[in-house]
Image (cartoon, helix red, strand yellow):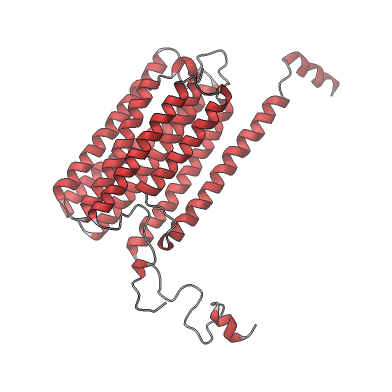
Amino acid sequence: MSTQEAAAIGLTHGGSEDTGLGNRGPASKSIVVPYGFWLFVLSDMILFSALFATYASLAHATDGGPTSNQLFERGTVAVETMALLLSSFVCGLAVIAAKRRDMMWTQGALLVTGVLGLVFLGLEIHEFAGMVAIGAPPQRSAFLSAFFTLVGCHGLHVTAGLLWLGTMMAQIWAKGFQPHIGRRLLCFSVFWHALDIIWVAIFTIVYLIGTLP
Amino acid sequence: MTEHQDPELLNVAPGAPHDSMLSETMSYVIGLVLALVLTGISFWVASTSAIWGPGVAVGLVVLAIAQMGIHLVFFLHITTGPDNTNNVLALAFGVLIVFLVMIGTIWIMGHMNANMGPSPEMMNLQMQRG
């Protein structure tokens, strides 16, 4: 291979400005920050895949205790699903409004996002408390341990997301639409949409398949 | 590729809407409608008796994967466009690991359950023989 050919495909510096790393330098922060956060979200999904695999392995290890068919209620799950899906949708609208620097619509949409998230979380806590009350706490069987770990981990993520959401609303209110605040808001929306994606897997694998006749 | 080209045009951040306000909003509305339809079908498939029993679980998983795709495209704006290559590659690697972990675990643990099924008495006999 001649030096010229090597340069043409970016292997050397000779005769070309292309170092093989791109000659434009690193991408701007508005790209790098959300991209790095996207990598975190993907690693979070890998964490959840381990919890899903655990749950799938232990779903029938009920040790004579209550089974998924006896415990889960589809009605509650449908409402939880609606709340989280609409929350995710309104969060997207908040990002659109924030891009236009519209304070009222941004804060309003974020508020609706948070309220719908709280509805989801309230229903989930109510469900967990009800299960513990009828003798189905995490220590009852391997199935219930895996269930509370998987769904509880998602619930913790939603809780953390709600705290983050409140912080974002305060920051936007106090500091306005500065570039770094915008990046944080974008990262939050990626996080919130990802939680909805994980919930799709949970309501399908845990609740719907778990309550098939 | 000239040096004066705006690097912002070559990359786009995941989740970043980038168009006119109407088309951005439409993207979310389309995503919401499709997600609602798929959720509705999922709940219907789970409760109907019109579908062959063993096929229901498979159908539900397919519907869930479809809905995740809808969320990725319309909410997170992960597309196959040239400005999205980095995001798609990272996603592809993530999906690879997720499938390896889940299918590998379910496969191996399923066989473990099938192979380690004997009753406690049988286990005792085997222990004594060994």
The quarter holding residue B47 reads top left
Outermost left residue: A104
Can you say which quadrant of the picture contains the N terminus of chain A?
bottom right
Q: Nearer the viewer, residue B13 or A209?
A: A209
Residue at left offset 25%, top offset 57%: B20
Could you say where residue B50 lies in the image, as x and y percent from the top left? 50, 21
Instruction: Specify the quadrant of the image occupied by residue B114.
Output: top right
Q: Is residue A143 left or right of residue A170?
A: right
- In front here: B26 or A48? B26
Considering only vertical position in the picture, is A22 above or below A69? below
Q: Which residue is painted at 44% across and 44% down in the image?
A: B69
Residue A4 percent across, percent down from the top left = 57, 86
Q: A112 left or right of A124?
A: left
- In-front residue for pair A161/A4: A4
Instruction: Report x, y in % for residue B28.
Output: 30, 45
Q: Report the residue that reaches farthest toward the right.
A: B129
Q: Position of residue A41 (x, y in %)?
A: 42, 47
> In the rendered image of this protein, does residue A52 appear above or below residue A74?
below
Q: Residue at x 58, y 24 (%)?
A: B54
Q: Residue at x 48, y 79 (%)?
A: A18
